[in-house]
Image: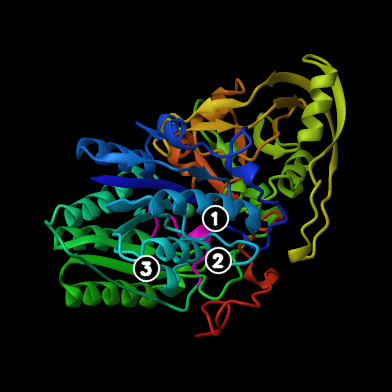
């Protein structure tokens, strides 16, 4: 048995000004890893790709990994990058195989295609019309029919933060192996609802996604091979952004349809609970100060969540609104992770550890899609640390995967230690802090540019969390996003 196993992952924020060339998928090299290098990078990691490799090897299959391409979310993927990745995968499939296992995101938009995964499948089907294909996908998938019609198995993450990438790969991979070994005949039903759940209300610890995902698990215990609710990625102005469900059964299309419809009905009936209400920033800062004043000595930090500028949703990670409010309010004993500003890092490297600098920090990128200019802020402090910015996740999310912040420096203003980085990385893992010599559990406040994923590795340390509405292209204020291409009406943009 010969299996092609490949990864193409990108969540595209169509409002993001951050470019997405091939290098963004390459993690420091010119191109993403291929062949043995890809296997080495992902074998044993908590990823869907890691699960595929393990399953295929234990089934005694010959495996071909043409490419493992994963990039932090940003603006539309450059056509040249997409063509490179898709071509590698198509070439491997064209050489002949018994099955294909794909580790995809599901919300990729390219310069030319608003359904990047659908275009990949169109190209694969042009060279292999019949080969069975299974896909493991992110919960933020925006599902298109043109994609779903061309694969036999879809399994999506059932947790947000995404701590079950490995298990999702196992579900998708096992269903496909069962088909290839003649033990199952996967059949699939799917559908969408006209709704755009706010990301800040999508956590799987929170209702209603908690109940939706629990029902998916139950369905898998009741005969479904894979049951998935995709909450969708709303910061993408494309026709089919939003919530969908897909269920795979063993040769029982009626059951697949009934389960998918049940999940869709359940989500629609709970739609109001997916709506996020934005709190004014000044109120949030005051609330954080009050909580910190009352918290017992030795308890963990108050987390200030700068959720409008999360690089794991396509944020520039350099807006200074929330950090500026923290500096202006004079909050003490704060660690801020992080500001993306490679120029500032170079200035700090030039100054050297222990020396004072004044930086024009952040605000380097304009955000024309939401009508905002980048606004740097003058910040003075002492350079505390300089490092190469590389670390491996402790987990539970993406355990063992390498993160590369690029050249990294810590600026200490006296009240605030600001981590300044040269590559986008979301703080969802304690290792992000240990890499820069900060113990977040010892801080009074920790500012994070994150929305939900920080909970994976850091929520157990926190005394409390206060959501801070700053500025950025990951805003949860839909009134500031021009939805021109998404199908209308759609809830809650339109009253329904
Ligand atoms: Zn996601």
Q: Nearer the viewer, residue 59 or 103?
A: 59
Residue for badge 2: 234
Q: Where residue 465 sits: x, y (%)? A: 53, 45
Query: Number of callouts in the render?
Result: 3
Judged from the image, the secondary structure of the residue bearing numbered disc 1 is loop
Instruction: Give left or right: position of 4 versus 467.
Output: left
Residue depth check, mark 3 versus mark 1: number of the one nearer the observer? 3
Marks 1 and 2 in Cβ contact (< 8 Å): no
Residue depth check, mark 2 versus mark 3: number of the one nearer the observer? 3
Residue for badge 1: 11
Q: Is residue 198 magenta?
A: yes
Image quarter (top left, top right, bottom left or bottom right) of the N terminus: top left
Question: Please, which residue is most extreme toward the top here?
Answer: 354
Q: Where residue 29 sits: x, y (%)? A: 61, 33
Judged from the image, the secondary structure of the residue bearing numbered disc 3 is loop
Q: Is residue 47 visible?
A: yes
The span from disc 1 to disc 2 (Cα, nearest Å) is 11 Å
């Amino acid at each position: 048995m010969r299996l092609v196993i490949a990864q193409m992952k990108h969540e595209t924020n169509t409002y993001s000004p951050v470019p997405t060339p091939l290098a963004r998928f390459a993690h420091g090299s010119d191109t993403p890893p291929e062949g043995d290098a890809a296997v080495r990078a992902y074998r044993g990691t908590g990823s869907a790709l890691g699960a595929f490799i393990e399953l295929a090897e234990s089934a005694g299959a010959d495996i071909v990994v043409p490419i493992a391409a994963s990039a932090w979310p940003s603006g539309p993927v450059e056509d040249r990058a997409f063509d490179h990745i898709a071509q590698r995968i198509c070439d491997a499939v064209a050489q002949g195989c018994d099955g294909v296992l794909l580790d995809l995101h599901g919300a990729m938009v390219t310069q030319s295609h608003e359904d990047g995964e659908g275009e990949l499948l169109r190209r694969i089907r042009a060279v292999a019309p019949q080969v069975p294909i299974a896909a493991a996908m992110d919960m933020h998938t925006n599902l298109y029919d043109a994609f779903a019609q061309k694969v036999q198995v879809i399994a999506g993450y059932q947790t947000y933060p995404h701590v079950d990438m490995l298990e999702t790969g196992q579900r998708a991979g096992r269903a496909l192996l069962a088909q290839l070994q003649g033990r199952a005949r996967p059949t699939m039903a799917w559908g969408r609802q006209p709704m755009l759940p706010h990301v800040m209300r999508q956590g799987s610890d929170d209702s209603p996604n908690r109940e939706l995902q629990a029902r998916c698990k139950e369905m898998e215990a009741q005969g479904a091979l894979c049951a998935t609710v995709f909450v969708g990625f709303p910061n993408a102005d494309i026709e089919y952004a939003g919530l969908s469900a897909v269920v795979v059964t063993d040769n029982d299309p009626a059951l697949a349809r009934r389960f998918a419809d049940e999940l869709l009905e359940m989500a629609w009936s709970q739609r109001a609970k997916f709506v996020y209400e934005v709190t004014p920033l000044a109120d949030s800062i005051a609330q954080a100060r009050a909580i910190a004043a009352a918290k017992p000595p030795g308890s963990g930090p108050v987390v200030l969540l700068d959720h409008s500028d999360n690089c794991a949703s396509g944020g520039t990670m350099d807006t200074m609104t929330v950090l500026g409010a923290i500096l202006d309010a004079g909050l003490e004993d704060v660690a801020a992770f992080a500001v993306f500003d490679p120029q500032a890092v170079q200035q700090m490297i030039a100054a050297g550890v222990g020396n004072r600098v004044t930086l024009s920090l952040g605000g380097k990128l304009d955000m024309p899609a939401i009508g905002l200019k980048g606004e740097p802020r003058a910040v003075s402090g002492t350079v505390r640390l300089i490092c190469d910015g590389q670390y491996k996740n402790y987990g539970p999310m993406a355990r063992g995967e390498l993160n590369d912040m690029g050249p990294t420096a810590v600026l200490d203003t006296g009240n605030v230690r600001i981590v300044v980085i040269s590559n986008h990385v979301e703080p969802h893992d304690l290792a992000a802090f240990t890499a820069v010599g900060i113990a977040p559990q010892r801080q009074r406040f920790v500012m994070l540019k994150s929305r939900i994923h920080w909970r994976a590795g850091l929520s157990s340390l926190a005394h409390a969390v206060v959501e801070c509405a700053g500025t950025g292209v990951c805003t949860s204020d839909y009134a500031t996003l021009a939805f021109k291409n998404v199908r209308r009406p759609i809830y809650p943009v339109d009253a329904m």
